[in-house]
Image (spheres, rainbow, N blue to C red):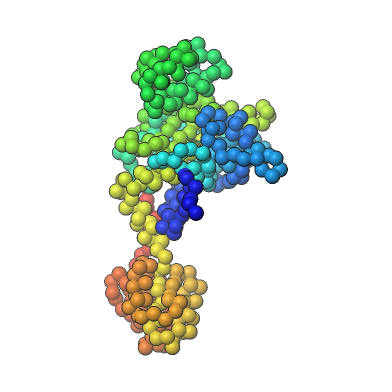
Amino acid sequence: MQLLPGFRDFYPEDCARRNYTLSIWREVAARYGFLEYDGPVLEPIELYKKKSGGELVGQLFDFVDKGERHVALRPEMTPSLARMVAARERDYKKPLKWFCAPSFFRYEKQQRGRLREFLQLNCDILGDASPAADAELLALVIDTLRAFGLGAQDFVVRLSDRDAWMQFALGKGVAQERLLDFLGVVDKLERLPEAESRRKLAEFGVELEAVRSFIADPSAEAAKLQGILADLKARGLAEFVEVDLTIVRGLAYYTGLVFEVFDRGGKERALAGGGRYDGLLELMSDGKVKMPALGFGMGDVVLANLLEEVPAAKARRDTWLAARRAAEVYVVVAEETRRLEALGVVQALRGAGWRTDYALTAAKVGKQFQAAETLGAQFAVVVGAEWPQLKVKQLATREEHLLSPEGLPETLRTLSLAPTPEPPLT
Ligand code: HAM
């Protein structure tokens, strides 16, 4: 039986890496005061047809359920979040700062950086229309990537503005109801052959040259975003952002500021993308709830590719993984006649919180030490000829101690090398 294309098995080493990503995502979001939430994996297909729009609608994993409902696996979080917040808007103080990091599903062609099931960190601020909220969210996306050991030489946040593009298009005579289709063409400009872009733009009566010269001069936009840029500069984050009008985003609901994050090498697809969607809650609540909002989504797939490529980031991840080794203590049953005593030692260690392992069946002492090394254990506790004493070996230094089983968990704590600290922000 083969895996479906675009889906992944998570063997323990893959799970450990996934946990690394999730733990950094959660930790940085918490540092910024964001609260975790979640929603359903399955939603009515209408939610995405009406609210996400763009190419996402063609990428839905959808089916009709046994109750004749046409449903889709969630391809993104934003419409569900808007629904949830609009429904209980009065229960929460504004602004709401919420995050989630579950799995999403898109029926895309499997390629580098794109799968059919992926994790996505979503961070959103709802109920605040100020540029301060824009800057706060941008700082969060930057600090999240920095916490992985990535720096300004590794990634860049490209800022743009849907509003500016709408004005441009209206100025060129693009009809209001065709604006989103027009933005869809601009969104793909870098990915399509020139002749095709030219032909598609001509359908809207717009020349490629006009689009190019609009993109070439972002000075008016930079002036408009000045407040946000000054805010980021005050935080020492100016070098992580640049104004770049090639960004328009593929989803329907964005209204103002939009951005995408790319690797500086330009080898990968976008690491993250987001922006303002000030009209979505109103749309979701039939006009009842008006609430400005903005947010971003960051996928795990492109991020994992980049972590492999940046040595400092890879080293940081590997240090984290090593610190969470499978066992801290390995109890070596040197004499089978002492197995029951050994089990008592194992139980006491585990009860005190030590990650402890041992051989389930008789094995040579050398083999057991090998297992201890493989598991990355700090201590081997030998139950054998020395009983009622224990020979304890610190595997890194080869130092040996003769210790009593009484109070062993506490004694080990005093002998233990300092635990590896969490990686700080660079
Ligand atoms: P998005 O640009 O569609 O935005 O996705 C954000 C990120 O999710 C992408 O930059 C990429 O890293 C990852 N991603 C998307 N599709 C795939 C895929 N098929 N395989 C792997 N990774 C993928 C949104 O989804 C918006 N809802 C984000 C948002 C939140 N806007 C406001 N709040």
Residue 378 occupies quadrant: bottom left
Residue 47 image position (x, y, % from top left): 62, 34
Q: Residue at x 61, y 29 (%)?
A: 50
Q: Residue at x 63, y 33 (%)?
A: 46
Is 216 on the left-hand or right-hand side of 186?
Answer: left
Residue 112 image position (x, y, % from top left): 39, 41
Is 316 on the left-hand or right-hand side of 258?
Answer: left
Above or below 158: residue 382: below
Task: State whether residue 419 appears in this view.
Answer: yes
Residue at the outermost right position:
67
Residue 183 image position (x, y, % from top left): 48, 22
Task: State whether residue 123 appears in this view.
Answer: no
Total count of labels:
0
Q: Nearer the viewer, residue 385 or 8?
A: 8
Above or below 154: residue 226: above
Q: Nearer the viewer, residue 90 or 11?
A: 11
Is 351 on the left-hand or right-hand side of 212?
Answer: right
Q: Residue at x 59, y 45 (%)?
A: 41
Above or below 298: residue 381: below
Residue at the outermost front position:
1
Q: Nearer the viewer, residue 228 or 146?
A: 146
Residue 133 image position (x, y, % from top left): 50, 33
Q: Nearer the viewer, residue 371 or 1?
A: 1
Q: Residue at x 38, y 58 (%)?
A: 321
